[in-house]
Amino acid sequence: MNQPPAPARSADFGEHVAGVRSHSLALAAPLSAEDQCVQSMADASPTKWHLAHTSWFFEAVVLGPHASDYQPFDTRFSRLFNSYYESLGPRHPRPQRGLLTRPSLAEVRAYRAHVDAALRRFIDDADEAQWTAAAPLLELGLQHEQQHQELILTDILHALSCNPLLPAYRSPSGKSARAPQTTAVEWIARSGGPAEIGHAGPGFGFDNETPRHAVLLAPHRIAHRLVNCGEYLAFMADGGYSQPTLWLSDGWAAVQAGGWTRPACWIAPDDPRAPSASWQVFGLDGVQPLDPSAPVSHLSFYEAAAYAEWAGARLPTEFEWEAACGVPGVREMTGHVWQWTRSSYDPYPGFRPLAGAVAEYNGKFMVGQLVLRGGSSATPPGHDRPTYRNFFPPAARWQFSGLRLARDGAC
């Protein structure tokens, strides 16, 4: 069975654990207790639930099975904060997480402190056999918590976007708007041929990034930057949301069912909530003027694919995207938006899930989803890498998700 790498036991690692855990609390700090309990849709979770679930993961996967002296904070929490692990017992329904007004936020924070103290003791006191067995799962737990740190931001943004007051998660950064981008898209020619894809170390990689394997790429060209808001406005102005020929069948059905006319979190000049007569964007900093040069965000796969069709291009495959990492001239690969690819979320040849309960971590979701690559402005620093495979259903648009274009042929 595939296993994550085992971190070395050291004071630095203990500090790393504490740093990741404290960052979750820092992300929650701007939010009231009421903010942290709300669930705006079935696909999102309350901040309080994220804080508790990430503690439950360490309790259920690391401390319970491997720390001989561990005592659970509250045995009832296993049912409340198990996400989807069938092998670890029953769980509260996902769409009803917002109904969990009890335990209180204070109790959840006490739960986190209890788990943190137990993790410190385990790192200090585990014997070699315990450490060898548990350390890879401890590292997995940290990576798992960083995934939920991004979800804390994306889920609360969606919740706040449902509030007519459009309250900001945080105070605006005060950074001045960028000058409009005048550089046209450059097409970086790629000759194709064999390419090695996937994670092989060093460092951590999720099981869905393995095994590293060879793929054969056809000649193609990839855009040197992301599609920006100004370009997407041109698509909208040209009737992009009213031309069924641009859309996949399921995408056109989603447009009709959802009444989509613009990306999620965009505020039209004629919107009753619009504070001005210009296009606005609602983000973590609240309502801000739309920056035409900023990468377009909060797109579904369907919208990304429709834009690519309108632009006379296509979305890159996840393999073309990964092979372009580090290529001179290709930029904005991470730190802005997750980038939809044209690749379905399938197992790599020879894929094997992790052993034990964490076999359910990734593999069982490998159907009906599309791969996104890169990393967004909400991705924790150091959490992204070229081989990282994010995945969502094609209609999902509450994430920081955008697109880069590709074309067939290298000339």
Image (cartoon, grey):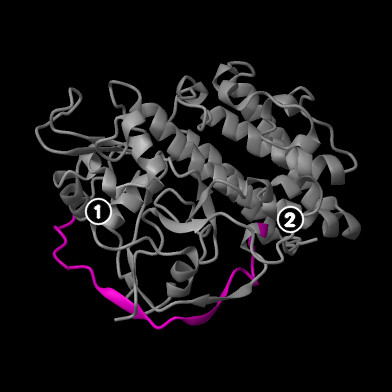
Name of the residue lying farthest toward the left = 277
Residue placed most toward the observer, 386 or 37: 386
Q: How far from the left and from the top, in percent, is residue 85?
A: 73, 37
Quadrant of the rendered image containing residue 164: top left
Front of the two marks 2 and 1: 2
Q: How far from the left and from the top, in percent, is residue 270?
A: 13, 28
181 magenta-colored: yes
Which SS class for mark 1?
A: loop
Where are the magenta residues, as a range? 178-207
Q: Are marks 2 and 1 in contact (CB under 8 Å)?
A: no
Q: How far from the left and from the top, in percent, is residue 394?
A: 45, 44
Gap in angstroms between the C-alphas marked 2 and 1: 38 Å
Residue placed most toward the observer, 12 or 217: 217
Quadrant of the rendered image containing residue 118: top right
Find residue 353 and name its label. Answer: 2
> In the rendered view, does 64 fall on the left or right side of 373?
right
Which residue is drawn at the image coordinates 28% and 49% (left, top)? 246
Residue type at the position of mark 1: Ala
The correct choice, above or below, for 12 with respect to 400 in the image is below
Residue 288 at least partly seen: yes
Number of residues whose C-alpha sits closer than 10 Å to that of mark 1, classed few (under 14), some (14–19) or many (20 or more): some
**What residue is shown with label 1?**
294
Residue type at the position of mark 2: Pro
Badge 2 or badge 1: first in the primary sequence: 1
Q: How far from the left and from the top, in percent, is residue 173?
A: 28, 45
Which SS class for mark 2?
A: loop
